[in-house]
Image (spheres, rainbow, N blue to C red):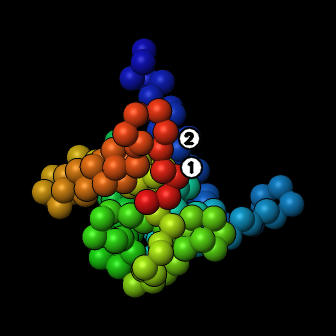
Amino acid sequence: KLEIRLDEYAKIAASWITDRGNSEGRYNDTNYGAYAQDNVVYDEMTDAVGHAVRANLWYNGIAYIGNRQQNKDFVAAAERIWRNIVGTQMYVTGGTGSTHDGDEAYGGSNQLPHDGYCETCASVGMAFFSQNMFYLMGGAEYADAVELEMYNGSLGSLGLEGNTFYYTN
């Protein structure tokens, strides 16, 4: 019974993925733009854009549903975005979301200022995304990215007493 319900939820999530980036016919034709990864449909995505926390969790969802439904188009989109992030929008520490513009946002390929924002929550989202990419592809680079995010972006943000954290890394 639970498996049937999970399949229903996966179908709903897949429809959200395919509808994102297409505001035609929406209530008030609402389009949230690049900030909310609503600027293009999933299969036209080439670069990570917008709010980094929201983006990393969104891309994670595409990878997860792609794996669950064996949807090759979702998998290809997730792989393309993951490669863009890791190759051009991630610091060596694993930080993502380099700009303060639009609150902890991706700034574009190779825009990695020395004072990058790199919010802790973006690191957690990137760890989830990399974990699902590992489940999909099985490559060590995905597991390495999970480890990088966990040690530098998550655990590294905790205060020594364990009851405080750094918001930006």
Do callouts 2 and 1 mark residues in contact (Cβ within 8 Å)?
yes
Depth order, front residue of 154/73: 154
Under circle 1, the secondary element is helix
Binning the other alpha carbons within 10 Å of mark 1 as few (below 14), some (14 to 19) or many (20 upward) gives few
Q: Residue furthest top?
A: 1
Binning the other alpha carbons within 10 Å of mark 2 as few (below 14), some (14 to 19) or many (20 upward) gives few
Residue 85 image point, x, y percent: 37, 70
Residue 76 visible to an observer of this rendering: no
Residue 104 image point, x, y percent: 57, 64
The kind of residue tagged 1 is Ser
Depicted 129 relative to depicted 108: above or below: above
Under circle 2, the secondary element is helix
Q: Quadrant of residue 27?
A: bottom right
According to the picture, the residue beneath numbered tag 1 turns out to be: 15
- Would you say 37 lies left or right of 44 here? right
Residue 148 image point, x, y percent: 25, 56
Numbered label attached to residue 12: 2
Depth order, front residue of 79/5: 79
Residue at image x 28%, y 70%?
92
- Would you say 9 lies left or right of 127 here? right
The kind of residue tagged 2 is Ile
Numbered label attached to residue 90: none
Q: Residue furthest bottom?
A: 110
- Would you say 96 lies left or right of 145 here? right
Depth order, front residue of 17/140: 140
Residue at image x 36%, y 53%?
153
Residue 139 image point, x, y percent: 14, 57
Residue at image x 48%, y 50%?
166
Measured Cα–Cα span from mark 2 to mark 1: 5 Å
